Amino acid sequence: MTNRGPVLVAKDISFNTGDGFVLRNISASFGAERIGLVGKNGIGKTTLLRLLVGELKPTRGKIERIARVAYLPQHHKLDLSQRVSAIVGAKGPEKFGQFGLKNIKVDRVLGSLSGGERMKVMLAGLLASNPDFLVFDEPTNDLDSASREAIYNLVNRWKGGMLVVSHDRKLLRLMDRILELSEQGLKAYGGNYDVYKEQKDIENAAAARNLVHAREGLKTAGTQAQTTEERQRERLKRGKERREKIGMSRLELGHMKETSENTTARLRKVHIQRVKNAKRALEEARVKIPPENNIKVDLSSTEVPTGKLVAALKKIKFSYPGSEPLFDNFSFEMYGPMRIAVKGPNGSGKTTFVKLILKELEPVAGETILGAQRIAYLDQNVAKLREEDTLLENAKRISGLEDEAARKWLARFLFKDAEVFKKVEVLSGGERMRAALACILAGDKPPQLLVLDEPTNNLDLSSIERIESALMNYRGALIVISHDEDFVRNIGVEEEIELG
C-alpha cells in the first residue's frame, strides 16, 4: 500500500432506518492501521461497516473512499450451486497457497466445500482484487481453529489498513487500535484488546467513584438548600419580632418584608439551581456506568465428588449411514468436577461425541455409561426456552420455583425488575444463553454435568464475560465445544480432547 494517509474517511455521519437513528454524528478516518471495532450487539457496528463500504448511504454526513476497499460481510449470500471460479476470478487461485487451498479446484461447487473452505475462498477472491483496505465483519465466527488461524495469519501479514468487527479476543489482540461504538458515539483506544481492556477497567473504576461523588453532591446540595431555607425563615421571624418590638411604621415594615422576601427568593433560586446541577451530574455519572458483568450465585448444590464417574465411553464405534466411522474403538472417562474442552476441525465429530455421551445416539459397538444423575445440554440455539413465554415463566417452568423465588434467582443472573417479563423472542443471543443457564441451574436439583456446544457464537464481548462469570460459580462437571481459546481458558478448562 503506497498511500500512508487516510484511505477511508467518515465525516459527521448519521443513519436513520425510518424507526429512528441507529448512528449519530460519527466521524473517523482509517489509514494503514489494523483497527478493531467493538460494542454491544445491536449498537450499529454492522450498519457502520455497510455505510463505510457504500452498501448504505448516510442520512447525514459524508464518506470519502480514497483507495480500493474490500468487504467481507458476516452473513455471506452465496449461491452454493456456483463454482469456486465465480468467487475468486482469474487471479484468485494465485492466493490459494496462503490459505491452504492448493487442492481446491476452481471448478468445485461451493456447496461441496466446508464453511471454513468457503471463507478462505472468499478471502482469496478479495485479495485477488488487490485492495488497499479490508473491512471484515465477524470473520472468525463459526470457524474451526484451523480456519481461524488462516484469518490470524492474514491479519499478521497484511500491510494495508484493516477494520474488523469481532468478539474474538485473540483476533482483537492483533489490532493496532480499538474503536468502541456505544450510545455516546465512537471512542478510540490506542493499542490492542488487552490495552483497551485495561483502559476500560480504569475508566469503569473512575466512573464508579464519580457516581459515589455525584450521589454525595446531590445529597449535600439538598441538605444545604433545606438548611438555608430553615435559617432564612428563622431570621425572618426574629427580624419581624424585633421590628414590631421597636415600633416600626407599617410602611417601614412593608419595605423590610419585601426586602427579606426578595433575599429568600434569590437564595432559593440559587439552591434550586445547585440541586439541578447536582442531579444532572448524577445522571451523567450514571450513564457512564457500564452494565454489571459479574454474576455471583451460590451453586454448591451442583458439586460433584472428586472420584465420582460422571460419564464414560467404552470402546465406542460409530458411523453415520454410508460414511466412514467417526469413532472406532474410542474410549473416554470423566470423573468429578472435571472441565473438558472438545476440539477439532468442523466435521470431526465434536457434536456427535456429545450426543453419544448424552445417549441421543446409539453406538454401533461399545458402551455409554452415565454416572451423573442430572445432565443439561445447551447449544447456541438454547432450545430449552419457549420463545412465546416470558423469562419468568420459563424459569418457573424449568426450575419449579415459585414466583418470588424465581425472580430473586433471575436477579442473581442480572435479570432485574421488569426484565423478567420480557418474552424470550425479544432477547439478544447473550441474554438467551444467560437466561438458559439461570433456568437450568435453578431449583433443588441442578445438573451435575453441563454440556455446552459453541456457547459464545454470535455473542458480544460483554455477554461472553457474563457467561464466563456464571460458569465460574458452577461446581459440577463441564464439557464444552468451543473454538474460543479465551473463553475456554477463562472458565477453567483443565483438559482438552482433540478429535479428527
Image (cartoon, rainbow, N blue to C red):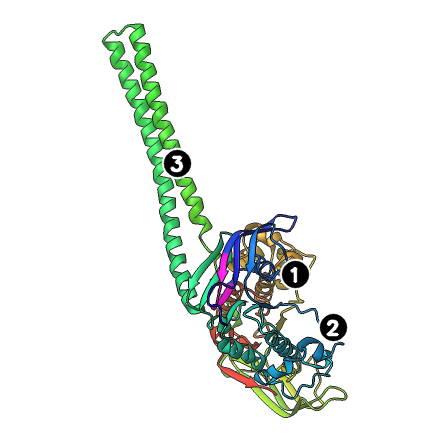
Give the numbered dot on residue 79.
2
Q: Residues within 10 Å of mark 2 (few under 14, many from 20)?
A: few
| Viewer can see residue 245 | yes
Q: Is residue 181 magenta?
A: no
Q: Nearer the viewer, residue 173 or 125?
A: 125
Q: Regarding mark 3 in the picture, which secondary structure is present there?
A: helix
**Label 2 amino acid?**
Asp
Q: Position of residue 376 (x, y in %)?
A: 61, 72
Query: What stretch of residues is rendered in magenta?
Result: 28-37
Image-based side of 468 in relation to 320, left or right: left
Q: Nearer the viewer, residue 209 or 64?
A: 64
Give the numbered dot on residue 397.
1
| CA distance for labels 3 and 1 | 47 Å
Of pointers 1 and 2, the one earlier in the residue sequence: 2
Of pointers 3 and 1, the one earlier in the residue sequence: 3
Q: Nearer the viewer, residue 41 or 59?
A: 59
Q: Position of residue 152 (x, y in %)?
A: 52, 77
Residue denoted by label 3:
275
